[in-house]
C-alpha cells in the first residue's frame, strides 16, 4: 500500500536527516588522497573536537557505533584486563558482552534499567579495588534502551574520590550533539560516538575522543588492532588523510550537519531537546502511563521510554502505529521487549512534528485498547506553547 | 534564526512535494529534441489525460497556472466576446480581470465568497441570454481563496437545460489530482490546471484539457496568440515534441508524481483528501470557530478557510505561527484579508502531519489570545483515528 | 540498452547543469508569499540585473524563452506596428513569425545564415525610414541555429547614426552568461533571455531587461497583455513578490548558478567560452570541414555549426553519435536540416569534456564515412593545452 | 579558483558514482529494525551473492574494504597461524602487514610488482609445506597499485595439485563488478570486497563471501572478534537484519547499483572494462610509454599503471593534470611513488569520458615536458571506434 506524506521516524536514532545533509551526501565522490579531501577532513576533525569538547584530535572511523566501542577497548587494554561496567540497560550490556568476546573481564554493577549509572556504587567498587585491577570504567551516557541519562561529572568525581587510576570510557552514541557533553572538562578518557543520532546523519561514521591518559595506555596496549588503531588514525588525520579508504560521502554530510549545529548553537540545541523531553513526559503522564526512567535528574532529552500498561503488548502498539500512521517508534529491547516502547525526540525535529508524533502515539494507544486520557496531547502542547 | 526540523507548508498550494519527485526533477537536463524526451513527453501527456478524465490530447505549458488561464481565453474567443463568470472568490475575480485585459466583456454573477457557483443562477443567466451573446461560462472548481468546491456537473446540467452553446471553462488549478474531476464525462470544454497542488510538483507546469467543441472554436478564434497556441502545441505533442523549449526537469517530476498518484489510486487520493477536510473542520468547529464555506455540499477537500473571530487579525495569527512553529498558512485574500486564514490539507500529506498542523493552529490561536476550546484538536484526531 | 557513464549533452542548450544547481532545485518548495521567498526573489533580481548589465529592475517570467520574446513585443508595441528584423537564421525567423501572429508588420533584411546582423544594412534601412514607421529593431545576439554572434554595439551605433527612435530589442537567450553583454552600456531597450544556456539552469525561467525608453513605450502600448504585463511584474518585484505563482524551485537554482558565475567571474566565463570556440573551430578546420560562420569577428563562443560535406546527412551523423557514443549534438534547423550539425560548447563545461566531445564527433564522422583528418582532435588539444 | 564542469575522477577507485545511485543514497534514513529495511537488506544480500557468484549467504559490513580484510582473517584463523601471501604490490603488502598485527605469521613469495601471483610458485610453496603449516593462501585479485590481475582459477588449480588444505582468500576490492569473478566455481574460501569500485558506490560498505570450508574454520577460530563476527552477521542477515546499526543510506545505493549492473548485464560490463583497458594501453604504447604490467594475460581491465620515463616525476605530472584539467589520477604507491601513475577506467564510464581522460593525460604529459607521440590518443580512439 502506498502511504502519502513523510514517514515519521521517531525512533531514538537514526534520527531524521535534514534535507541539506541528504543533499550533501549525494555530491559526487572525490579522490580521498587529493587536496579537496584533506580540506574536508581537517575541517570535520576540528568541528568534531568542538562538539566533543576536547582539545585533542579525535578519531573518525568509517564504521557504525559498535566499531567505535571495539576501538575504545582494543586501543587501550590488554588481554585479560578487568573492567568495571554499570548495567544501565541493553546497550551497556552489549558493550560488556563485547568486552568478554575480547577476553576482558567485566565486573558489572547491576542496575534496574530505570536509573542511570550510580556514582556512589561506582565509587564504592573502585574504593574496594585497592590493587587497581580495574583498568577501565565503562558507562553509557544516554542509555538508548531506557531513556535514562547518566550523570557523567558525578561519576568522574566518584572515580577521583576513590583516587583510582582506571580509564573512564563513556558511550555517547545517542547523546552527542543532543545533550550537553564535555570530554575534557568532565575528565573522560575515551568517548565513543556515532553519526546517526544527534549529528543528524545517516549511520556510517563513528568516533573516539581520547585523553592524553588514554593515549598513554594505548602505547602499551597489546590487544590486536589494525582497522581501529589510533596511532595510524591520528597520524594520518594530522595531514587531513586517513590510513585507509574513508566514508567520503557521509563526511560531506558531517560538514553540513556541523554547520547546522553551529548555526543553531549547541546550547540552543540542548535546550530544544530538554524541552521536547518535558513535553513528551507531560503527555505520557497525562495519559496515565508511566515513564520508564524513575529519576528526575536523569530524564533523557533524547528519547522517552514508556511502560506499557499490563495486559497490552508494546510491539502490537508499534505495529498499529506503523500500519495506520506510518510512524516508527522504538521497541523495548531484550528484557523490556513488549513491555516498553520508546519515543525518539532528537535530531532535526521541531514542535509540530513532535505534536504529530504524540498525536500518533495517543491515537495508537486508543486503537490498541489502552485506556488513556485524551488530554495527554494537550499537556504536551501546553509546554510547547508556553516555553 | 535557525529552525530545526521540516517546515510545515500548509498553504493551499504549492503543496508538499514528495522526496522522490524532488529527486526526479534534479536529474540532468536532456535534449528536448531527442528520443528520450519524446518518450517522456508522450508518457506524461497520456498520464495527464487520464487525470483530467479526457480522451483528447491535453496541452502542457512551461508556465504557471495564470498562463493556462490566458491560454483558455485566447485560444477560443474573439475580441469583444462576452463571457459569463461566477464570483466565487479571489481567483474567479482574477480570471475575470484577465478577460477584461484581453478586451473581453465579462458579466459577473455576484457571490458571497462562502458558497460555490450557483447552477441555478447560471442557468437563469443563460436562459435570459436568448441571442447567445455569452461565448463562455467560466467557473473555478475549487476556489482556493475560500475553500469552496463548486458543483461542476450541476452547472453543466444548467447550461444544458438552458440549451446554451457557450463554452464551459473550468479552473481546476487547486483541485486536479485531489478532488474527483471528469473533463469528458462532465462536459467541460476547457479545463485549466497547474502542477503545484494536487499533482505534488513545484510550480512551473500548467495545462489545458480541451473538448472537440473548444477545438472548433479555436479554429476561428482571432485573439492574438503565439506561445499559447493550441494548434502548435497539439501538433508537436502528437510527436512527443513541443513547439518551443519545454520545462524539462519539472516534466521528470510529473512522470514521478503520476506514478505516485496511480500507485495510491486516484479514488484513494480523493477519499484521503475528503477525510482530511472532515478532520480539519471538526477541529475548527470544536474550537468554536467558523468555517468560511457555508454549504455542506461544497466543502473543499483541499483546504479549509477559517473565519477569524472579531477583534483578531488573521495575518497576525499567521505571523505568530510562522515565527513560533515554522508553519506557513494561507492568508485571507483581497476582501478576506485579515479576517480569514486558510489551512491547506492537500497533496503529499498524512494523518500525523495534519495532526501536527492542527496542533500548530490551536497553539497559535491560543498565543494570539483567541479563546478556543483545546478539545478542538481531539475532535480532529477522533476522525483520523476512527476512519 | 543501458548506457554506462554520463550522457554528453553538447547541444547549444539546454547546457549541462552543475550538480549544485540540480541540488538547489530539489529543495522543498516554499510559500511564495512568505518572507523566505521575498529574500530569494530580491536576491536573484539583483543578481540578474548584474548579469544583464543594467541598473533597472529586470523581469523574471516562469516561462521559457519564447514567452520572453512575446513579452518584449506585447509590452511595448501597438497593433499594426512595423518592426525591422534581420534574418540571421532560424530563431530570428521564429521571432519575426511571432510578430506577425500578433498583427505586427515585420520588414526583414535578408541574411545568408552565415553572418550576423549587418549594422550597415540596418543603418540604411533606418535612414530610409524617414517617417519612423519602424517602432522596433529586433536582432538575435547569438543565433543558435548558425553559431554567429551579431555585433550589438555596432548595430546600436548604426541606429544612432540614423537618428532613429525605434526601440532596440535583442534576444540573448543563448548568449547571456556565456558571451559579454551590456544592456545599459550598449543602449538596448529590451533584452530577452532564458535560463537554460549560459545560466546553466534547466529551462523554465525567462527574462526581460528593459530600458527607461522601453518602459515609456510600455505605458501607451495597447497590445493585449496579462501574464506578460511588465507593470505588474515590476511592481510586485519591488517587494520581492510576483503577481502570480512563480517557478520557485528553478529560482533556487538561479541563486546557485549566479553564485557559481560570480565565483568564476563573468570575465573568466566569457574567456573560457571564447577559448572553447577556438579549440572547436581548430578541430573542424583540421578535419577539413567548414565552419558555417564565415565572419571571423562573429564566431560564436557558445556553439559551432559545422557544414556537412556533400553526400552526407548531418542527421545520420548525429544518430550514429547518439547511438554509439551517447552524445547529443544540435541538428541543422529549417533550411539547414541535414546539411549542418551544431556542437554546443557552453555552460558548465571544462577542457576534458570538450576533448571527449570532439573525440566523439571525430569518431562519428569516421563511422559515417566522412573523410576527415584524424589530426583534427589534436589541433583542438593544442589550443586547450597552450592557452 | 572555481573550475567549471565535472571533475574527472579517473583514479582506480572510488569510481564515478551514477546520478541515480547518488539520488538513492540521499533518500531519508529509515528504521533499520522495521519491515522496509528487512526487504531492502534481503534484496541486496541476494543481489550481492549473484555478483560474487556464490550460493552461500554473503556478509555486508558497514565499513570500508580494510575492515573486510580484517574480517577474513579474524573469522577463520587462530593466533600464530602461518599464512602464505604473494607480493603483487602495495595492497598485498598491506594485507600481509595487517596479518602480522594480528599475530599471524605470513610467508611472502616475493613478486616484481609487474606480474600477478604466480600459480606455479604458490604450488611449489604449498607442496613444500608437507605438514600443512599454512592455514591460508592470500592473494589480491586485481592489484590496484600495479594494474595486474592475477589468475585465480590457475592458483586454485595449483592449491589442488598440491593437495593442500589451506583456505584460499582473495581480495576483489577493485575487481568485483568490473572483472569476471566466480567465488563458488573458482573454489575460493573467503572473498573480500568493497563498494567504491566496480559497484559504483561511495565507500562505506565491504563484503565477505564465504565457502562452507571457511565457515567450518570459523567455528573453531579463536582470534578475538566482535564487530566482524560472521556468526552474528549471518544469523541476523537470514532475517533481513543486522546485529548492529547498518550503513542504511549506502545500502539504498547498493540496491540501485545492482539494478544498473543487471540492466547492463554483468558480461557486458566485463567486456566494456576489457575494451577500456585495451584502448588505454593502445594510447600508452603509442605515446612511447611503458605499461607497468608486463604479462599480457594479466592486464587489468580496471586500471592501467604507466611507467614514467626517467627524469620525470609522476606526482608532478598528476599535479599539473589536476591543476590544469581538473582530473584526478592515481599515484604510484610505496616503492612506485613518483615513477608510476595510474589511470582508472572502471565503474560508470563511457567512451567519450575515457577519450577525455586520455586527452588530459596526453596534454599533461606534454606540459610536463615528456616527449610523447600525439598520435597516442588516436590509437585509443581507433579501438573505441572500431570495437
Image: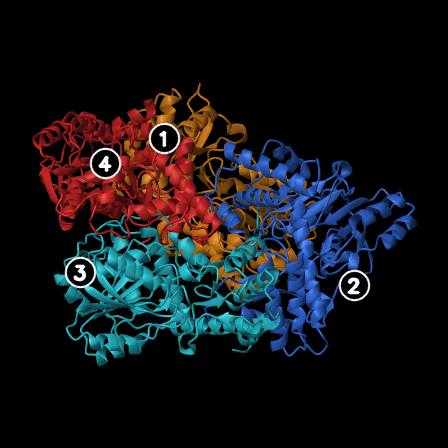
Chain colours: A blue, B cyan, C red, D orange
Q: Quadrant of the C terminus of chain D?
A: top left
Q: Quadrant of residue D214?
A: bottom right
Real-space CA distance between mark 4 and mark 3, rounded to the nearest whole angstrom: 59 Å
Q: Quadrant of the N terminus of chain D?
A: top left
Residue beneath the point at 58% across and 73% down: A320
User: What residue is shown with label 1?
Assistant: C266
Label 2 crowd bin: few (<14), some (14–19), many (20+), radius 10 Å: some
- Mark before the other along the chain sequence, 1 or 4: 1
Residue C362 circle label: 4
Q: Position of residue A375 (x, y in %)?
A: 66, 71
Near-viewer residue (B7 or D351): B7
User: What residue is shown with label 3?
Assistant: B80
| Residue C5 visible in the displayed image | no
Q: Are marks 1 and 3 in contact (CB under 8 Å)?
A: no
Q: Quadrant of residue B12?
A: bottom left
Near-viewer residue (D121 or C104): C104
Amino acid at each position: 500500500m502506498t502511504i502519502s506524506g513523510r514517514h515519521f521516524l521517531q525512533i531514538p536514532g537514526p534520527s531524521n536527516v535534514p534535507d541539506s545533509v541528504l543533499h550533501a551526501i549525494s555530491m559526487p565522490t572525490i579522490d580521498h588522497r587529493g587536496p579537496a579531501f584533506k580540506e574536508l577532513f581537517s575541517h570535520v576533525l576540528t568541528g568534531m573536537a568542538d562538539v566533543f569538547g576536547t582539545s585533542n584530535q579525535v578519531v573518525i572511523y568509517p564504521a557504525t557505533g559498535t566499531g567505535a566501542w571495539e576501538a575504545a577497548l582494543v586501543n587501550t587494554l590488554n588481554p585479560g584486563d578487568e573492567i568495571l561496567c554499570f548495567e544501565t540497560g541493553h546497550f551497556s550490556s552489549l558493550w560488556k558482552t563485547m568486552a568478554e568476546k575480547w577476553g576482558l573481564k567485566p565486573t558489572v554493577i547491576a542496575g534496574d534499567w530505570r536509573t542511570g549509572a550510580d556514582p556512589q556504587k561506582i565509587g564504592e567498587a573502585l574504593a574496594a579495588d585497592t590493587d587497581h585491577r580495574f583498568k577501565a570504567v565503562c558507562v553509557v551516557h544516554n542509555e538508548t534502551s531506557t531513556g535514562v541519562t547518566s550523570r557523567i561529572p558525578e561519576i568522574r568525581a566518584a572515580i577521583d574520590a576513590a583516587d583510582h587510576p582506571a580509564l573512564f570510557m563513556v558511550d555517547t552514541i545517542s547523546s552527542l550533539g543532543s545533550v550537553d557533553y564535555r570530554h575534557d572538562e568532565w575528565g573522560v578518557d575515551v568517548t565513543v560516538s556515532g553519526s546517526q543520532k544527534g549529528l543528524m546523519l545517516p549511520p556510517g561514521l563513528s568516533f573516539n575522543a581520547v585523553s592524553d591518559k588514554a593515549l598513554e595506555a594505548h602505547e602499551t596496549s597489546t590487544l590486536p588492532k589494525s582497522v581501529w588503531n589510533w596511532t595510524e588514525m591520528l597520524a594520518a588525520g594530522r595531514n587531513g588523510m586517513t590510513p585507509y579508504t574513508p566514508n567520503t560521502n557521509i563526511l560531506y554530510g558531517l560538514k553540513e550537519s556541523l554547520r547546522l549545529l553551529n548555526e543553531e548553537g549547541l546550547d540552543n540545541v540542548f535546550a530544544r531537546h530538554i524541552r521536547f523531553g518535558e513535553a513528551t513526559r507531560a503527555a505520557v503522564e497525562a495519559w496515565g502511563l508511566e515513564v520508564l526512567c524513575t529519576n528526575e535528574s536523569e530524564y533523557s532529552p533524547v528519547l522517552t521510554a514508556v511502560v506499557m500498561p499490563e495486559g497490552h503488548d508494546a510491539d502490537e502498539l508499534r505495529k498499529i502505529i506503523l500500519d495506520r500512521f506510518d510512524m516508527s517508534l522504538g521497541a523495548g529491547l531484550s528484557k523490556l521487549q513488549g513491555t516498553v516502547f520508546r519515543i525518539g525526540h532528537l535530531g532535526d525535529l521541531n514542535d509540530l512534528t513532535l505534536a504529530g508524533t504524540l498525536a500518533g502515539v495517543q491515537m495508537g494507544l486508543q486503537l490498541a485498547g489502552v485506556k488513556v486520557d485524551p488530554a495527554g496531547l494537550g499537556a504536551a502542547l501546553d509546554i510547547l506553547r508556553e516555553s
